Image (cartoon, rainbow, N blue to C red):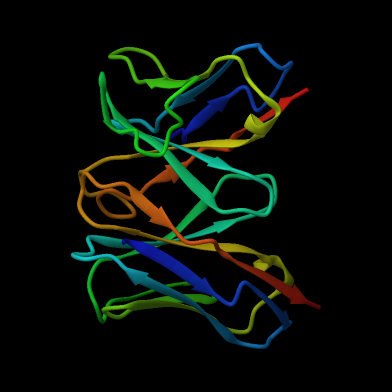
Amino acid sequence: EDQVTQSPEALRLQEGESSSLNCSYTVSGLRGLFWYRQDPGKGPEFLFTLYSAGEEKEKERLKATLTKKESFLHITAPKPEDSATYLCAAQKTSYDKVIFGPGTSLSVIP
Amino acid sequence: NAGVMQNPRHLVRRRGQEARLRCSPMKGHSHVYWYRQLPEEGLKFMVYLQKENIIDESGMPKERFSAEFPKEGPSILRIQQVVRGDSAAYFCASSSPNPGQGGPDTQYFGPGTRLTVL
């Protein structure tokens, strides 16, 4: 069964304390792996799309990487404004639904 | 370039009434998705539509729920005879199979409609 899991469920960091969020997927023939950020009461905000193992993308303090079974979202020197829920999602083909993971709730403490 | 629009943002209905949620995709996007999110839970896929076609409705309850994406106008998610368990945030997303800023098939989300059933 196609599945996306994320760990940890929640993460609390001190400002400036770098860490990584994990996304594991069991989707045969992955077409795309997506990362989103969701703030309370808002819709998910697109961050990255990764298409093949070994691919990396960066945006400010965030870097996403992809292997054949996992993706990582690395957060370097986080700030309180990085606090949000980070969602990972996987898609098999262009006409398949996207499967979302449960998310990691990140809190960055000043 | 306007993003995905959803309205209303908040909707209150009494049990037994109908709820209609609207979604206008991003310009140039022909694929629309609906998701439901309960408090402290993840996004649950409901339905995937293209213009005048339902591609995948495997996540949508068989009764009371329906969705459409007509040739002209927004996509509509319709919930008939609402019950308290329908209270949730409903998100719409749109995508294009063509390359774009985030790559093909990247879904962009609207702000959601928060449905409360009294």
In the image as oriented, which residue stretches furthest toward the right? Answer: A110
**Vertical position of residue A24 compared to residue B100: above or below:** below
- Horizontal side of residue B39 vs B22, given as left or right: right
- The location of residue B52, given as percent across then percent down, is 26, 18
Question: At 46% from the left edge and 31% from the top edge, which residue is drawn?
Answer: B61
Q: Does residue B4 show up? A: yes
**Quadrant in the rendering for residue A109:** bottom right
As drawn, B105 above or below B92: below
Which residue is depicted at the point 41% across and 22% down? B67
- Can residue A65 be spotted in the picture? no
How many numbered dots are placed on residues in this image?
A: 0
Left/right of residue A57 with respect to residue A84 in the rendered view: left
Image spot of residue A101 (x, y percent): 47, 61
Task: Give the image location of residue A58, x and y in percent.
Answer: 42, 74
Residue A80 pos. (x, y %):
73, 71
Give the quarter of the figure containing the C terminus of chain A: bottom right
Q: Is residue B85 left or right of residue A21?
A: right
**Residue occupying image coordinates x 66% and y 33%:** B85
Q: Image quadrant for the N terminus of chain A?
A: bottom left
Which one is nearer the viewer's eye here, B64 or A22? B64
> Is A27 rendered above or below residue A71?
above
